[in-house]
Image: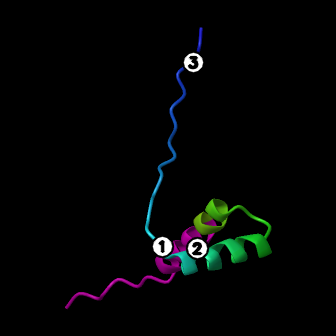
């Protein structure tokens, strides 16, 4: 009997210009990664840095 597999990954789409796509492809190639993997890693690293450095405002 086949097991039901639950995919927890979500896909995020955003629009970029041809020039931006070229830059991303070049950067991904330099790191020897696919463009999707490179974009995911960059976004996750930036999000991690923001959360890590977040200081909530102090209440009065």
**Residue at 47% across, 49% down:** 10
Q: Quadrant of residue 5?
A: top right
Q: Quadrant of the C terminus?
A: bottom left
**Residue at 67% across, 71% down:** 25
Q: Determine the main secondary structure of the stretch shown in magenta.
A: helix
Give yes or no for contact between labels 3 and 1 (Cβ–Cβ under 8 Å): no
Residue corresponding to mark 2: 21
Give yes or no for contact between labels 2 and 1 (Cβ–Cβ under 8 Å): yes
Residue at the limit of the structure toward the bottom, as seen here: 60
In the image: residue 60, left or right of residue 14: left
Mark-to-mark CA distance, 3 and 1: 38 Å
Q: Nearer the viewer, residue 34 or 10?
A: 34
Q: Quadrant of residue 54?
A: bottom left
Q: Of label 2 and label 1, which has the lower sequence position? A: 1
Relative height, residue 40 to residue 27 (above, below)? above
Q: How many marks?
A: 3
Mark-to-mark CA distance, 2 and 1: 6 Å
Q: Regarding mark 3 in the picture, which secondary structure is present there?
A: loop
Q: Which mark is residue 16?
A: 1
Q: Assess disc 1: are there few (<14), some (14-19) or many (≥20) residues with their C-alpha within 10 Å of its C-alpha.
A: few
Residue at the limit of the structure toward the left, as seen here: 60
Give the extent of the magenta segment.
41-60
Q: Which mark is residue 49?
A: none
**Residue at 44% across, 66% down:** 14
Residue corresponding to mark 3: 3
Q: Regarding mark 1 in the picture, which secondary structure is present there?
A: loop
Residue 32 image point, x, y percent = 80, 67
């Amino acid at each position: 009997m086949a097991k039901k597999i639950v995919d927890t990954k979500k896909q995020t789409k955003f629009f970029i210009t041809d020039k931006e796509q070229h830059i991303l492809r070049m950067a991904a190639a330099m790191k020897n990664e696919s463009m999707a993997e490179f974009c995911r890693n960059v976004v996750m690293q930036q999000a991690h840095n923001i959360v890590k450095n977040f200081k909530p405002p102090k209440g009065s």
